[in-house]
Amino acid sequence: MASSDEILTTLKILIIGQSGVGKSSLLLRFTDDIFDPDQPATIGVDFKVKTLSIDGNLVKLAIWDTAGQERFRTLTPSYYRGAQGAILVYDVSSRASFERLEPWLQELNTYATKSNIVKMLVGNKIDKDRVVTREEGLQFARRHSMLFIEASAKSKEGVQCAFEELVQKVIQTPGLWESDNRQGFSLQRGGEEAASESWCSC
Amino acid sequence: MSNFLAEVLHAKENATIDELNEILRTLGSKISQLKHNVVQSLHSTFVLYDTDVDRVVEWYTQILDAKEQTEKLENQLGEDKQILHSANEDLEQINCELGQCQASIVLLKSLVDIVKNLERADPADYYNAARLIKESEDELSSIAGSFRNAEDHIWVKQLRARFSDLVVDVYDKCRKEWGALFRFDTNSLTIYPHAANIDQLITSLRNIKSFNRVWEKFVNMLWQELFKPACSTEFKIEVCESNTGLKYEADDVPTRERDSFIGETSFLHVNDVQDKERDNIVIRAKKLDKPFSNAAELFGNLTELITGINSVFCENQTEMTNLANVIAPKICNELANKYLKTLILQKCGGDIEIARADVAHMKKFVRYLEDEMNFHFPEPNIFQDIEDNFDSLFKSQVREALVVKLRDLIKSDVHNTDEINYEGVPNSKLSADEIILLRKNPALFPRCVVSKSIAVLVQLLKEHMKQYPKDVGMSASVLSLYLALVKIPKHEADAGELVPLTSVLIHNNSLFLAHHAGYTFELCDDLVPDLRGKASQAIAFMMRSVRSKLNELISTAMSSIEERVDRGIDITHDFLVITAELKRLNTVMTGVLPPLSWHDILATLVDHTLNEMCSKVLAWDDIPANSASELASAFTQFAVATSSLFKGDASSPREVEALTARAVKKWQRFKLLSFVLTASMKEIESKWVGGCGPLAIEYSAEEVRRLVRALFQNTDRRAAFLATIK
């Protein structure tokens, strides 16, 4: 395990979205490479830590998985505080989950304390019959200046890529994490335009 | 000249002084004329002879003599005049003395007459005696001014003393006769019409100037024993005739001392009439078991009574008028103060027609007494007042009665409650229309419990407003009254009997009234903020009160932990006492406040409790390992027990935990503290995660460092760890 000295920075990432879209499965697949088809609904909030290597630099991710069910939601404004990245998840096989993205995005924009927080839209469950086309997801992401990726926690497809893309984007975003980082760091970054327009398609 | 002198002398003998003076004055003018003639003749003659001169000289000498004689006579006449004047004065004095003698003779005659009258006056024959006394008194009064010297005054005084004695005796006799006529008892009067001649008695009493005293006493007794009860609703006046004579023993009659004449006497024991058959009139005020509630009965009472009295004084209209002059204002006053408005305006139960019928009856009653009994009420009087202002009085009475009723409701027990549930139609006392109206209402009042009295108050006000739609000020008055009467103390020490439940009920009552002030009653919008303010005061008081209690329990639970742990005392119990208190409160309050409101309040109270606990732990500089372990265990048990308050329909502990965390803001902070108390530095770091972990959400870096310092010994490792917490 990497020592604290080797960690470039610690980033706070939130996973939000409608209940049952597979937020916890994505997290479990990413952190523990596990998929549980009977994954129970998240109650309250889950928290996991994963260290990721980006361009040879180790970045520690503190990932917050929130409950989608309204009655168990405890995600108060304080949980949004200091988050550098947020993954907004919908289920490509559920039109309703796609149509409920707006309120989640609104809540994120309301409570996020960092104005340049990196947002990523993830269309999960691409292993199932889709009712939301990739194009629709892409358009939503473009409309809201979000990164976009389609993934399947079950088949692992796109999961690692989504987190890596998000972290890379965070790292490339000036002023988003440096204030929390006490070490010098240099990273090859794309231009501003590239940062705002890019989305992963792996 | 001699003629002149002769004339003077002649006049002196016959004429009075004045006539003599007149003659002298005529003579003087004649002499002057003569002198003038002489001079004229001298001038006309031109020649003056010695003889003529001698004659003139002689005349002149004669004239001088005559003048001297005249002066002498004049002096003598003056002296005579003075003598005569003195004689006249003496004569006048004699005449004056004669006049005085004549007056004294008349005065003496009057006195003799007075004395004779007094000697003839026999108190047994009180009527004639009183007449003679009056005549003598009048006579004495008319001649009283004639006595001037002190000696006279002494015997006039003696005469007056004799008068007084006689008056006392006659009065005594009259009083007994009056007592034979009228016998008062408790709330009753028996009249013996044939016991004495009332006209003679009244005249006699008037003649000895004692009627007013007897009459006033009689009227006072009448008022006290009969009229006053007749003005109340608790007595029934009965007038009946009876020929059963009342027997009195001679010994029963008290003997009055002469010098107690002025003192109080009673009619009750005065009766020297021997037993004999008489037609008596008995007027009685009979106490009723239950007060009557009909104004007609009151008028009937008074009519009966006045008719009964009038039957005795029907021939004495002056006395009836006097009686009315005294009694009528008292009746008006008594009825105005107590019964009439109550009977006419209150007992009708708000039915204006019944009240109007009573007013018509009242008018007949007044007219009957005036026309038939010569019993006039003073003007203005209560009857006129009611008749003239009936509409406004009726409305004001209705308002007054309602305000009194509502005031009692406001002050009644708040703990007698009623559930307000506008949504549940079958249980609601509202009509279907009202429920529909309320459902459309954007501020639908939530389900909760309010005091029954307040619910009734609102209902009564609604009914009143329906009946009197123009009385828009009523609701505002009542709500203002509520605000004035319901007090919330600022300090807990002044709470008295105000327990948290009472405060909550006041809160609900106030909001319930505010709701209706806004949506049901007109012109009450201004009072809504005040009513809501009252509700806020009540709930704030409840919160202060409960917090204060919780603080005490927390202090008990968290004091001397180290010592108690060292002595092996279980510290968990004291924390569970806090939970028990919260659960007790929950049991008491559930259903009282709207469910969501109470949920929030309970969460706030738990939040306060947890915050206090966390603050106390954070304030400690050193937490020994065993204390930390025991405290963590106690915190965990407390958390499990307390979270059950928020479990709702949750099925698993994790769900309960999540629901509790959602309700109570400081829940996670408290849970993390429990974790930190027994955690290693590495475990703490796993929750801190460079300021991105859960610990960083609830605690500042400084707070975490402080906890680490309190929990761990000062080592290099701790220093290195502390350095990472930024």
Image: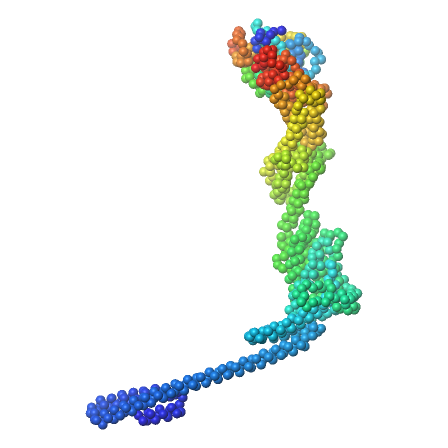
| Residue B95 percent coordinates (x, y) | 51, 83
| Residue B229 percent coordinates (x, y) | 71, 56
Figure quadrant of residue B416: top right
Extreme residue toward the top, this view: A56
Q: Where does the C terminus of chain B fall, quadrant-wise?
A: top right
**Who is closer to the viewer here, A200 or B193?**
B193
**Where B26 falls versus B213 (above or below)?**
below
Asked which colour scheme the image uses, the reply is: rainbow
Does residue A185 appear in the picture of this structure?
yes
**Who is closer to the viewer here, B145 or B609?**
B145
Figure quadrant of residue B208: bottom right
Left of B726 or right of it: where is B191?
right
Residue drawn at point x = 65 percent, y = 68 percent:
B210
> How many labels sit on residues?
0
| Residue B619 percent coordinates (x, y) | 61, 22
Q: Where does the N terminus of chain B fall, quadrant-wise?
A: bottom left
| Residue A123 percent coordinates (x, y) | 63, 12
Residue drawn at point x = 62 percent, y = 8 percent:
A160
Extreme residue toward the bottom, this view: B51
Does residue A132 appear in the picture of this structure?
no
**Who is closer to the viewer here, B631 or A122?**
B631
Figure quadrant of residue B409: top right
Residue drawn at point x = 60 percent, y = 11 percent:
B717
